[in-house]
Amino acid sequence: MCNNRRRQQGLTLIELIMFMVIVGAAAAGLLQIMNMANTNSTDPIRRKQALLIAEAYMEEVQQAQMSVCDPADDNAATAITSAQCTAPVTVENWGPEGGNARPFDNVNDYVPNNYISGTAVRAFAVNDGTNLIDRDVAGNPLGANAAGGALANSTLAGITTTLALTPVALGPAGSQVPAADALLITITVTYGAGANDVVTLQGYRSRYEPRAR
């Protein structure tokens, strides 16, 4: 008769406790990663929204004319200096003329009359009595639904946009477009409180004088 007994298989209490500790730590780490992924999952959407807004505003500004005289002036297409405008009141300067509304007919109409070049301003916002609210070219608050819903209920709530216009010289020396005839357009869209929650889009607009020379 054999006295050797098959050893009983299983886990000791210490092994079971160690297993529970390791699994618990791994599960906690996994849950933390999942929570971070869930929290940050909306960031790409918000960034895409901000980029689309910047592109839309950039297109609107670049489609405006850039002339020495107001586009309604008979000499707007050929005037190189303000003296060639038909009247002093039609000379283009920073700020919109009386009665002008978006979409403006000249790039510099998008900034205020006392504008300092290169300064970021809320060019697309309108004060609703309490806050500045960015609006589309038709005057609707960004994110308002088809029935005119409140911006606070929109995914675009909290997004703000600024515009800066800076005269710049373009091209190599000798064939350079002078700063008086070209603008750097900078549109910045902020969609969150973080330092990286910003989209900046830049483009150029140069003066078009088809019959100037």
Image (spheres, helix red, strand yellow):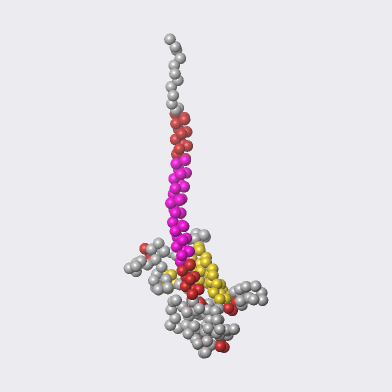
Picture quadrant where residue 118 is located:
bottom right
Taking the image as drawn, is residue 118 in sight?
no
Above or below for 31 versus 1: below
Q: x, y percentage for residue 30?
A: 46, 44
Determine if the magenta segment contains residue 47.
yes
User: 180 or 96: nearer the eye?
Assistant: 180
Look at 42% across and 71% down and name the residue there.
136
Q: x, y percentage for residue 184?
A: 56, 72
User: 32 or 203: nearer the eye?
Assistant: 203
User: 69 or 196: nearer the eye?
Assistant: 69
Determine if the magenta segment contains residue 41.
yes
Look at 41% across and 64% down and name the residue there.
156
Look at 50% across and 71% down and name the residue there.
163
Q: Main secondary structure of the magenta part?
A: helix
Q: Which residues are magenta?
A: 26-54
Taking the image as drawn, is residue 78 in sight?
yes
Q: x, y percentage for residue 177?
A: 61, 76
Above or below for 90 versus 27: below
Q: Quadrant of the C terminus?
A: bottom right
Residue at the farthest top position = 1
Q: x, y percentage for residue 96?
A: 48, 80
Q: Quadrant of the N terminus?
A: top left
